Image (tube, grey):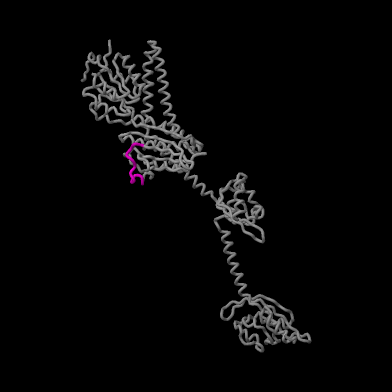
Amino acid sequence: MLPHDPAEAALKPIVYIDDEPMLCRVFQKILTDRGASAVTFTDPEAALAYLRDHEVAAVICDYRMPMITGLQVLDRVAEGVPFFLVSGDLGITASRGNARVTGVLTKPFRPETLLEMIEPYIAIPD
Amino acid sequence: MGNEPALLFDELLRTLPLAAAMFDRDMRYLAHNDRWLPLHGEPGGPSLVGRSHYEVFPDLPPTWHAVHRRCLTEGVAETGLDTYVRADGRQEHIRWRVTPWHDGGGAIGGLVIYAENIGDQVRTEERLAERESLIRDLFEHSPLGLNLCRMDGLWLESNPAFLDIIGYSRAEADGGLTYWQLTPRKYDADEAVQLEQLRTRRRYGPYEKEFLRKDGRLVPVRLNGFLVSRDGEDYIWSLIEDLTAHRELEAKLEEERVTAIQTSKLATVGEMAASFAHEINNPLGVIDAFAFTLEDAIGSGDQEYIEEAVRSIRVAAARAGKIVHGLRKFARHPDSDPIEDVEIETVIDDALDLCQARIRTHGVELSVRVTTAGRVHGHAIELSQVVVNLLNNAFDAARESKAKWIRITATEGAGDTIQVAIEDSGAGVSPTVEASMYRPFFTTKPVGTGTGLGLSISRVIVERHRGTIVLDRAMPHTCFRMILPRLP
């Protein structure tokens, strides 16, 4: 899909999936402040249901969640959707072999790093 | 019986309890009694009357010949005790008295010799002396302290081993020191118990106490003793074992055990490091991200959001702090884990502080049911370590299972015990694994993930607390029980 068309992306939301509600809340705010559209989910199944019905600009997904891992989520996301994996565990290397992972963010990461990585997928209004 | 002097003389001779013979000046037998005959080995032999003494006893020592001559010439009686070796090699011990007899005119008519073969008596004495020496050797060389004392505690006899223990010389101890002078007062109550045992059973011990040495040091000892009676008075024999080396060994073993427990605990923390990182990273991320948004929010004066952000930052910081606090408490040095009375719920809570986030993050359902306020006496952190080890095993088994659950229950058990049961939905423990699972370095986990020390150390810890750890085969799922004595 890259390079991305920002005009097109502007219409599509970024989906943020993390079982930590406070992280969902704050990244919703950060992404929205940047002018992006953001939808957050603490329940991966709800996110997957949403993804089935919506076109999205990108998915940012936590790796370690109670019922499912980020890679298992990825398996169920349509081909072609940019997918960023966020990992807090030490030594998670599973993503390296997975060509569908667009990028990996290792916790702890700065919000700037996330924004930088997601920048191409966000349409920032002039 | 008539009164004739000759008959009276014969009767006197016959009843005399000694061998006796009467000689003329030429040492020819005038008379002798039956006891005389065995002296030269011929009991019941023919009478010697008329024969020469020197002919009958050709091997008499020359000194005796001299005695006879002196006695005949000087008229003075002599006595003696002699050992002589007979021609056949036998040793004879003869106690004798040689005395002159006088005729009607007062002249020396010859000699009377009384003799007693005291060989048996001498041999008995020798045997006694030998036994005495054996017992003396035992007393002097025994590595066990031995002491005889009067009922009032005065020491009468102490062997070198006992003197070594108390650091006094024999001259200072025996007849000078009492048991009580060397017994610290803190043993008063224990002493009363031992004395009561002496009264009722005539023995006491095994009894462990300390003696106060001459140099002021306390020396740990184990005592056993019994009463003996002599001439109507009771005495106490005590056997005293120095426990210093024993105690040093115990202390060393305890130190090694504590080190092993601590090492295993730190290894457990290492194994759990990934999950701690996860649990700290999340709050850190929350704090950083909210702080990031605060700049803009302050600029735009979004008061409501500022308050939410500050609140969230504080919640996240507290959460991270709690994890670090739990970790620090768990990993702290054994010196900071004293023996105390601790509620079992606290033990479980401390373990949960470390484990529950990891368990829940991996989608394993965790239920905890504590139905006792019971307390146990022991090291709180060590006991938490057991719960952590059991929880980690349960977690590794449960996460691979379909149902994914762990149940912790703490209940009061039979016989004043507290039982902590940790049950999981895992595949269970095979009899082969069960046979080896308490062995150090035994693990069923993939290489690099388990040290194989969890269960072995857990068992060491539980047994240190006079408890047991069992795999409950009666339960449908894997269920380990830690059973500890409950404080009243």
Between A8 and B109, which is closer to the camera in this rendering? A8
Q: Quadrant of residue B97?
A: bottom right
Near-viewer residue (A66 or B211): A66
Residue B385 colored in magenta in the image: no
| Image spot of residue B375 (x, y percent) | 49, 36
Residue B181's spot in the image, x, y percent? 64, 48
Q: Which residue corresponds to the image point at 58% horizontal and 67% vertical from the top-left? A: B130
Please tell me whether residue B72 is drawn above or below residue B436 in the rendered image: below
Q: Is residue A100 above or below residue B82?
A: above
Tell me, yes or no, if residue B464 can be seen here. Answer: no
Residue for point 38% across, 37% down: B423
Position of B182 relative to A104 (above/below): below
Does residue B222 appear left or right of residue B465 in this picture? Answer: right
Residue B211 visible (yes or no): yes
Is B429 magenta? The answer is yes
Quadrant where the N terminus of chain B lies? bottom right
Magenta-drawn segment: B424-435
Image location (x, y in percent) of residue A4:
22, 17
Horizontal side, residue B216 vs residue B470: left or right: right
For this view, does B255 lie left or right of residue A2?
A: right
Q: Quadrant location of residue A8?
A: top left
Residue lying farthest to the bottom in this orientation? B50
Whole-percent x, y for residue B185 in the image: 62, 45
* Camera-nearest residue between B280 and B248: B280
Q: Nearer the viewer, residue B364 or B54?
A: B364
**Picture residue at 34% right of the left edge, 46% below the top:** B431
